[in-house]
């Protein structure tokens, strides 16, 4: 493997999936790439002035505008007749919530931009608050469990479907536990003459609360339980699905993480576990994840 | 314009008239943008700036400019797109007003903090609530501290001519600071006035191509928009302040270089009108300056010694130029189209602050007028002068609403 385009020495937590995601994306994209990112963990841990971990040109402006900033970058790339990749890499808070307006604009205008969301399912940079990506009944600091609460009351927003509704020609889900698959998806996305969207399951050690060293295992379990199907959509049609060889019950995934601990402690947790299993089963049926 | 400072280059009035065309203010600005050869224009409709981007889109459609023209999802995205294009080294333009400028607020700080020389026309309009689409200066005065140079123009010709000047100032490597060209909504954007249209070739000789030192380039990768902690943040702000101070000379230089090529001059940081022996001097910005000049001519004919200082550059605030121009006044009356709810209004308090640590001790009284598009008449200006004259005997009110309709309160 060639030298990584994200230099070591960044300040992300040990066991964080975000730098792994960046490395895999840049490894696939190569050095002829410009990256725009929102405010968040990525920005504060990779660019503490005067240091930067980025070995490709990188720009951060605000929390909710990387898709718009990248649109301006892409216009200039096109104007100069260059073939430089333009990639947004941002977390779910920016992607699902506050940046939705500028994401929608970028998708709809058809810019040749790859948008990669490293999805850790909450606002982690501010200390684990619920986002539109937080799964059903996950504990966060703004959806804590308690006598009257079982955690986040709503299921996760279906962001790939929103991208597809914009007629984004290439949409995929990926996981850091499947690096070959992720690299291949990035390469495919970059060949598309238009926008593309890849949503990467990226566990957060402090937000999901798990022991260091099992980040990859947790992300693999998300896939193997059917909670995070690996799917590729071209022009809105499912073109590829990662089959699950050894299907596992959702409990095996959920019990690895502190954010779901209450579901195993409380008597009314069992019904919730059943609901989450139903969600996984629905995914399995919808995408035919098991042969 | 100014009695002393603006010699017309074409002395023969018939020849001058022949080269003039009657155009809408928004068209004149769009034409000036086109002549400034931008790379990227972003557009979002909001009254009363919409005609500017409509005219620009037609120029793009007609092939009069090869600029990339992007219609976006909000004013917030309009300016965010320009963060990307400007960081790529592209000359970048947008225009907005009022609520649109407020929606851009975060991005305004970002553009200036990243030292990106974006130029934007602000078609000045009131802020809601209550909703009001007409002219005042609340929008841009409210954005006083965002780190942009703010130039205010008096008429359509000046709005056009200030546009290439703005790029020249913004892109100067000693300055690297974005510029807002503030023109009164409707009063200037929608009025048809005779103007001398700029031509691309002469603008090219005035405004060199944009050659930034740092851009997003894979051959030489830079990080833009890094995170600065308390050990470096102050120095970023200090450098912006330094650039603002340096920009004063550059604003004056751009105005005189423009005059050399085009023969038109509107003052550098400020302009003056009949101030030499004036006892009462009015200070104002924007299109109301034209009305004030007419009022001054009438009052002068009646024997009153009244003059005017027009502020072109509100940020940077031209303290030295103002002190020089106002030092012999016996009373100063500020007329402004904004209010700071809780304490006076921007220009009044800025001017008083500028004079406090000096030996200038004439009374300064402030008047807010023209809010939400209410007309400011010659009669209103005469009343303002009467009130200012009364203040020479002792200030009764440091700040007031000049045209308040007490009967509907």
Image: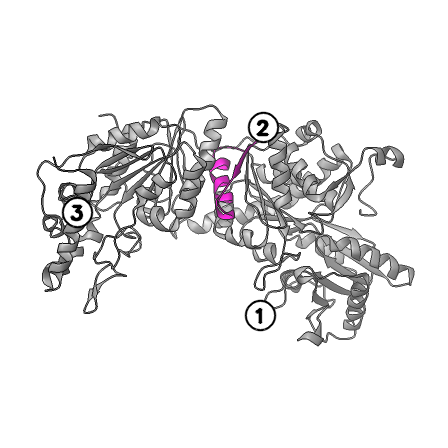
Instruction: Identify the element where label 3 is drawn.
Output: helix
Of residues A46 and A168, the one nearer the viewer is A168
Image position of A117 (left or right of B273): left
Task: Classify 10 Å Cα crowding around label 3: few (below 14), some (14-19), many (20 and above).
Answer: many
Q: Which mark is residue B1?
A: none
The CA distance from mark 3 to mark 1 is 57 Å
| Residue located at (18% from left, 69% from top) | A147
Q: Which residue is mark 3?
A: A280
Vertical side of B125 occupied by B114: above or below = above
* Disc on the earlier residue, 2 or 1: 2
| Residue A82 at x, y percent in the picture | 44, 24
Of residues B119 and A227, the one nearer the viewer is A227
Of discs 2 and 3, which sits in the foreground? 3
| Residue B91 at x, y percent in the picture | 56, 34
Q: Chain of mark 1?
A: B
| Residue located at (34% from left, 39% from top) | A164
Q: Which residue is mark 1?
A: B342
């Amino acid at each position: 493997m060639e030298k990584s385009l994200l230099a070591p020495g960044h300040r992300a937590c040990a066991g964080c999936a975000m730098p792994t995601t960046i490395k895999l994306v840049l490894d696939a994209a190569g050095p002829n790439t410009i990256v725009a990112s929102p405010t968040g963990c990525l920005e504060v841990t990779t660019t503490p002035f005067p240091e930067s971990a980025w070995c490709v040109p990188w720009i951060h402006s605000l929390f909710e505008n990387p898709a718009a900033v990248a649109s301006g970058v892409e216009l200039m790339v096109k104007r100069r007749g260059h073939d430089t990749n333009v990639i947004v890499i941002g977390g779910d808070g920016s992607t699902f919530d506050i940046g939705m307006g500028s994401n929608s604009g970028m998708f709809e205008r058809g810019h040749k931009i790859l948008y990669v969301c490293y999805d850790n399912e909450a606002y982690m940079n501010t200390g684990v608050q619920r986002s539109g990506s937080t799964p059903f009944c996950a504990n966060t600091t703004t959806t804590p469990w308690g006598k009257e609460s079982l955690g986040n009351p709503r299921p996760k927003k279906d962001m790939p479907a929103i991208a597809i509704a914009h007629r984004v020609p290439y949409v995929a889900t990926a996981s850091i536990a499947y690096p070959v698959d992720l690299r291949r998806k990035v390469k495919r996305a970059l060949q598309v003459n238009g926008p593309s969207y890849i949503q990467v399951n990226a566990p957060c050690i402090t937000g999901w609360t798990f022991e260091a060293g099992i980040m990859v295992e947790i992300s693999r379990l998300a896939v193997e339980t059917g909670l995070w199907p690996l799917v590729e959509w071209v022009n809105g049609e499912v073109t590829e699905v990662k089959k699950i060889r050894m299907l596992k019950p959702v409990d095996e995934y959920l019990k690895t993480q502190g954010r779901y601990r209450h579901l195993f402690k409380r008597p009314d947790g069992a019904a919730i576990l059943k609901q989450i299993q139903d969600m996984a089963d629905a995914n399995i049926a919808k995408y035919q994840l098991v042969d | 314009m100014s009695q002393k400072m603006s010699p017309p280059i074409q002395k023969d009035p018939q020849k001058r008239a022949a080269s003039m065309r009657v155009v809408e203010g928004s068209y004149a600005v769009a034409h000036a943008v086109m002549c400034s050869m931008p790379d990227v224009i972003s557009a979002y409709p909001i009254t009363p700036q919409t005609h500017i981007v409509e005219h620009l889109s037609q120029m793009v459609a007609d092939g009069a400019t090869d600029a990339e023209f992007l219609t976006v999802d909000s004013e917030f995205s309009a300016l965010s797109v320009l963060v990307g294009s400007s960081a790529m080294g592209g000359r970048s333009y947008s225009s907005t007003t009022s609520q649109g400028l407020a929606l851009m607020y975060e991005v305004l700080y970002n553009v200036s903090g990243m030292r990106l020389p974006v130029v934007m026309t602000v078609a000045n309009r009131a802020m809601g609530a209550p909703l009001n689409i007409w002219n005042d200066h609340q929008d841009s005065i409210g954005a006083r501290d965002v780190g942009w140079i703010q130039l205010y123009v008096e008429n359509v010709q000046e709005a056009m001519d200030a546009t290439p000047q703005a790029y020249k100032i913004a892109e100067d490597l000693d300055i690297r600071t974005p510029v807002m060209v503030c023109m009164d909504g409707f009063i200037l954007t929608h009025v048809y006035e005779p103007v001398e249209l700029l031509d691309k070739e002469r603008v090219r000789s005035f405004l060199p191509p944009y050659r930034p030192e740092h851009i997003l380039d894979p051959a030489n990768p830079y990080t833009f928009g890094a995170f600065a902690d308390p050990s470096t943040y102050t120095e970023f702000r200090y450098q912006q302040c330094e650039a603002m101070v340096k920009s004063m000379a550059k604003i004056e230089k751009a105005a005189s270089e423009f005059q050399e090529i085009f023969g038109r001059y509107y003052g550098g940081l400020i302009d003056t009108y009949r101030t030499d022996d004036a006892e009462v001097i009015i200070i104002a910005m924007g299109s109301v300056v034209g009305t004030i000049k007419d009022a001054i001519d009438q009052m002068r004919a009646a024997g009153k010694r009244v003059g005017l200082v027009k502020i072109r550059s509100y940020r940077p605030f031209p303290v030295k130029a103002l002190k020089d121009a106002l030092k012999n006044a016996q009373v100063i009356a500020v007329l402004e189209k904004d209010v700071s709810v809780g304490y006076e209004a921007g220009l009044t308090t800025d001017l008083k602050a500028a004079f406090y640590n000096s030996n200038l001790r004439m009374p300064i009284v402030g008047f807010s007028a023209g809010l939400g598009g209410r007309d400011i008449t010659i009669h209103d200006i005469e009343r303002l002068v009467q009130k200012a004259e009364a203040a020479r005997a002792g200030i009764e009110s440091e700040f007031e609403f000049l045209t308040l309709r007490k009967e509907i309160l």
